[in-house]
Image: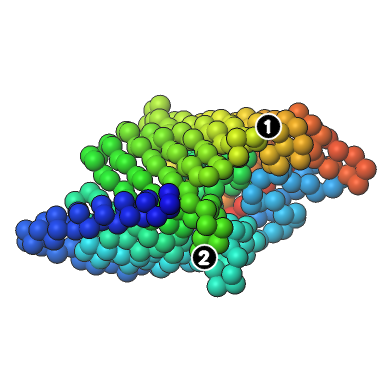
Amino acid sequence: MKKINSIIALSALFLALSPAVINAQEEEDTTPESTFSLSGTVDTYFRSSFTEDPVAPGTSFANLNGFALGMANFIVSYEGEKSGFVADVVFGPRGSDAVFGSVGNSSELVNQLYAYYNIADGVTVTLGNFNTFLGYEVISPAANFNYSTSYMFSYGPFSHTGMKLDFSVSDDVSIMVGVFNQTDQTEANYDRYTAFGAQLGLYGQYINLLAGEDYTQIDFTGGFDLSDSFFLGINATSASLAGETGFAGVALYPQLTATDSFAIGLRGEFFSETDGFGALVSDGDADNFSLTLTGSFTSGNFMFKPEFRIDSASSEIFAISPTETSDNLASFVMAMIYSF
């Protein structure tokens, strides 16, 4: 009944606002030019840890050994006067990890697939599959400063399939509300599980909520320009599963732009799980602190990112040799990314 009521409410709001957009369009003297575009990224990397066995931190992406492949990402989009679409497909290990929740073969490569309609000035309805609105980091390697990803990103949602309404209240204030399938379930609602999402954006700071039958996550994402060359990003999150187990974390992302072609950034993350959530240990409580230092060299559409990372956990979760485990791990990544 919850699912039916939420769909009816969103549909009613859509129908109520439709006449307003028709009148607004009739008053416009000029029609914006429609655009069709092809964009995407290609990334590859080398990763090594300073141990006998090439173990990786337990986060998503950049977790293969030696010379490794990321993904090829192709995004076809069309933006019309009042509507458009995005078709985003991925290939390669990073792409497979990004769409791990897909069940049918038809959607194994679909990262995003949605259509949208501007039903009024500052109001957009979107239906389909789209990347999550929670968190500081994203799937695209070109959009993250650090190449490896955080625990908060890795164990939170990657994408949602459903319907959302975005309201642009002003240049500095935005609101989003939506209803979705189970998190990361791309094709359809196989489990008949409904999740609700909301976001409040205020002057570049975002408060996010994702809630369903047995999962709740509250997230803050934001940042501040402390000077013309120094930016501080912030992410804090708390998630619970069935009210019994969950995780929480906070991360700071200081980034310094030294020249037009070089920047350096640090991610400091504290991540904690309770009652064997499964990110760090299968039973009990555990936490991990990681420092990731990344350099970013840019030349046109090309980026080169050398990265050094240290993880320190409360338990010996890193298998550093066939017979040894450790509570800390140091690793190095060197990545190349091309955007088009």
Q: For the point 35% across and 57% down, which residue is it?
A: 126
Amino acid marked by disc 1: Thr
Label number found at residue 53 = none
Give whichever of 258, 235 is nearer the camera: 235
Residue sitting at 47 percent across and 48 percent down? 195
- Residue 327: x and y, percent? 79, 32
Q: Which residue is mark 2?
A: 187
Report, in whole angstroms, how far the alpha carbon at label 1 lies from the one at label 2: 31 Å
Q: Does 236 sit above or below residue 45?
A: above
Give the secondary structure at mark 2: loop
Q: Which residue is mark 1?
A: 274
Q: In front here: 36 or 83? A: 83
Q: Quadrant of residue 18?
A: bottom left
Q: Which of the two discs, 1 and 2, labels the residue nearer the N terminus?
A: 2
Q: Position of residue 306 (x, y in %)?
A: 62, 45
How packed mark 2 is, by other alpha carbons closer than 10 Å (few <14, some 14-19, many 20 or more), is some
Residue situated in front as seen by the camera: 285 or 206: 285
Of all residues shown, which one is farthest toward the right?
A: 323
Q: Is residue 256 left or right of residue 284?
A: left
- Disc 1, SS: strand
Vertical comparison of 248 with 166: above or below: above
Q: Amino acid at mark 2?
A: Glu
Left or right: 331, with 225 as reference point: right
